[in-house]
Amino acid sequence: MGILKTFGLNPVLFGAQIVNFLIIFFILKKFLYKPILEILKKRQATIGESLKQAEETRLKLEKVVIEEKNILKNAQLQSKKIIEDARTESMEISRQMNAEAAKQSEKILAGAREQIVRDSAEAEKRLAVSTSKLAADFLKKALKDIVTTKNQEEIISGALKKIKK
């Protein structure tokens, strides 16, 4: 006990302080510590659920990113195919148009040749008629004083027959 007096400890007060401490500890444990633990557990559960949802969302996002990349890759492949098909089709259309233009120009040339042949034949006929008339007029003038009118007509008609052959 000498030590207790040296340090200034009163055993009754010390016992009362221990009882007070235990009462306050019991009250705090019952009314404050348990509700705080429950709140912390709820928060921990909420945080765990949020982390779980965040992980699920991250996985879904990764899947969406992968799908997006696949869709973009497919779209690029399809666009390349469409462009290539369009090029091929345009080249085919160009080739067909060139062939059609060649046919049209050949047709026009053939028509022009036929027209030239017809025009030439018609010009030859007109030239033959003009030549015949000119020859007939020439013979009339040349034979006018030499033979009779009846003989002139016979000679001219015979000459025209020979010219027509």
Image (cartoon, rainbow, N blue to C red):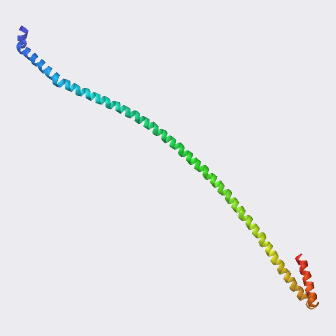
Q: Quadrant of residue 135?
A: bottom right
Q: Total of numbered circles in the picture?
A: 0
Q: Decide: is 64 above or below 94.
A: above
Q: Position of residue 128 (x, y in %)?
A: 84, 78
Q: Quadrant of residue 163?
A: bottom right
Asked if residue 9 lies left or right of residue 52, the reply is left
Q: Position of residue 78 (x, y in %)?
A: 54, 44
Q: Quadrant of residue 149?
A: bottom right
Residue 27 in view here = yes
Q: Position of residue 156 (x, y in %)?
A: 90, 84
Q: Residue at x 90, y 88 (%)?
A: 142
Q: Decide: is 112 above or below 46.
A: below
Q: Residue at x 26, y 28 (%)?
A: 42
Asked if residue 118 lies left or right of residue 135, the reply is left
Q: Decide: is 13 above or below 121.
A: above
Q: Position of residue 121 (x, y in %)?
A: 80, 72
Q: Farthest top residue?
A: 1
Q: Quadrant of the N terminus?
A: top left
Residue 10 in view here = no
Q: Residue at x 29, y 30 (%)?
A: 46
Asked if residue 10 lies left or right of residue 101, the reply is left
- Between 24 and 42, the one lying in front of the other is 42
Q: Quadrant of the C terminus?
A: bottom right
